[in-house]
Image: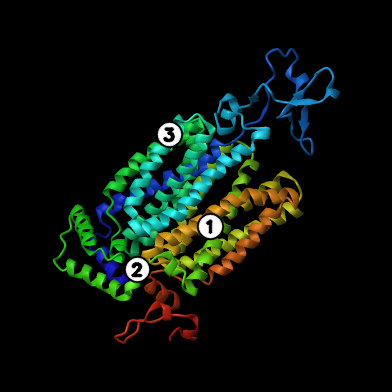
Amino acid sequence: MSTKLDELLSKLGQPGKLQSICAVLLIYSFMHSICMNYIISFGTMLPPHHCKLPEHWSWSKNASIPRRTSIGGLDDHYDACHYYNDPTNHSLGVRPCDAGYQYHYKNGYVRITVPTEWDLVCGDRYLVRIFQLLYFFGVLSGGLTSGFLCDLLGRRPIFFSYEIVYIAIGVACYFSRDFTVSCFLIFILGMSMQSKLQASYALIMEMFPVRYRTMIGIAALTSPATSYGLATGIAYFFTNWRLQILFHAMCGCVSLIGAWLTQESVRWLLSQQRTCEALSACRAIAKFNGIKLLPSIEMEVNEITDEIRGNLSSSDSKQTLVDLLRYRVFQKYVVIVAFAQYTAQLSIYGFSFLVAEIGGDMYLNCVIISVVDTVLRALSYCSVKKLGRKNMSLIALAMMGIMNIAFVAIRAFGSLSPAVKMMSIVVGITGRVFNGMFFCAFYILITEMFPTTVRSSAQGIASSAGRAGLMSTPLALFLGDYIWKQFPFLLFGVMGVFAAALCSLLPETKDRPMPTTIEEAARLAKKVKKSTTATTLDVRDIEMPMIVGNGKV
């Protein structure tokens, strides 16, 4: 059935003009959406600061504010949160900054961020963390809900509606001047960003037949690395965090063109047995591409729908994630996918903290890393094409874990010389690159492994697990402050190697058609041949004890 569906999509273009235009616009949407994750990081940065002295104060800054020296005496700076009660008598102690704060900006460029706008420093610094967490909780919520909605209502309406919400909330964030309101808006912004991201990715991957999926998947999954550099450039030129959000929100207006041009996924329509709508979508695509379809196209669409209907019992006419999770094989796959995503996201954001240690201009360092990551992700196309999705995923994940462990070994047992420090940073950045290559292969694997009827829901679980890993990064780094400084990276390494071992249990999907129903996905996973009898083999009968050495029942 899936082979017939791929043949049907091939008749609509190889690839067609409409598919190519829509793919570019959807990848553009994918790219500027991911930029928002980085903008939240840049927009919550806190520059060095100290107390602003009261207007009536007659003493100098040097006399009024205590000096603090870091371990090793390498950094001598003003106390960030206190000044002396009496500069002539330091024994009287210090007081909090009751007249506000003075911020120090590099090269004199004033940058308005969330903490500087509302003076969320010192005792109020936790409010910045709440602001960040609310955004990522929004992303987490979007991942959990949008997958279900995409499978229930379709990919295109979810993408279009959340794109509008994304633009509207971005504009509202610009005009909001209340911190509580901004926290609410940033939660909705994160939810809409993740929702349209998942819907656009499903549209991209389901638009093309099997021969183009690796190429289009790598193109889409290279965009997060490119987004890192673009977000850095926007953060450099737009010095107000509100302008950064507004700019990226208005970029969504171009994405609306893609939402308008793109037809609903033919795969999804057929999986829902909406034959007439699928046929109309095929004719609209063919008309735009200048292809004249044969009269037999209607018969082909009806045959595919009849096969799908024949594989489903009356109670399964609408398959959901609950149906998928009734079977042991898919329970195993979902747990492995969630753990691998959690580990990879936990590690990649842990590596991001190394950027500050490189020295030099932070923005330039981010752009260089973005360029390197983009090029290597694009080159991973050859590896994914040759090695397959599963093999590339587990190799990249294992190498990421090994790089983490090597980083710990260099930092723990090497000297503190600049050369050794730089070597450890290079090893860490290499681990981040392998992490990016893992995402390129793994997302394609997830897309091809789960059936169309619940594909977006399964991707939503994977995405949400990744966001949970992202939110766990500060906690892991916090453990490093109390257990051992290198402990977080050792943890990332061990988890990476273990996750790679688990990925070996996943099926290889290279050059295989996308499954449409849970039954097809089960046959692919278990390598069970379709019954030659007139009776349809129900997926509930496919259990591990039925499989023997050569994969036959």
Q: How far apart are marks 3 and 2 (CA)?
A: 40 Å
* Residue 155, percent from left and from top: 34, 55
Q: Write down the residue under mark 3.
A: 172
Q: Where is residue 25 in the image (x, y as percent from the top left)?
A: 34, 47
Label 3 amino acid?
Ala
Q: Mark 1 points at which residue?
A: 465
Q: How many marks?
A: 3
Q: Which of marks 3 and 2 is in front?
A: 3
Q: What residue type is labelled 1?
A: Ala
Query: Circle 2 is placed at which residue position?
Result: 516
Image side of residue 210 versus residue 82, left or right? left
Local crowd at mark 3 within 10 Å, few (<14), some, or many (≥20)? some
User: Which quarter of the image is occupied by the N terminus?
Assistant: bottom left
Mark 1 to mark 2 CA distance (whole Å) = 24 Å
Q: Which residue is depicted at the point 58% across and 65% down?
A: 499
Asked whether residue 432 is in view, the answer is no
Measuring from the top left, give residue 435's x and y in whole percent.
55, 56
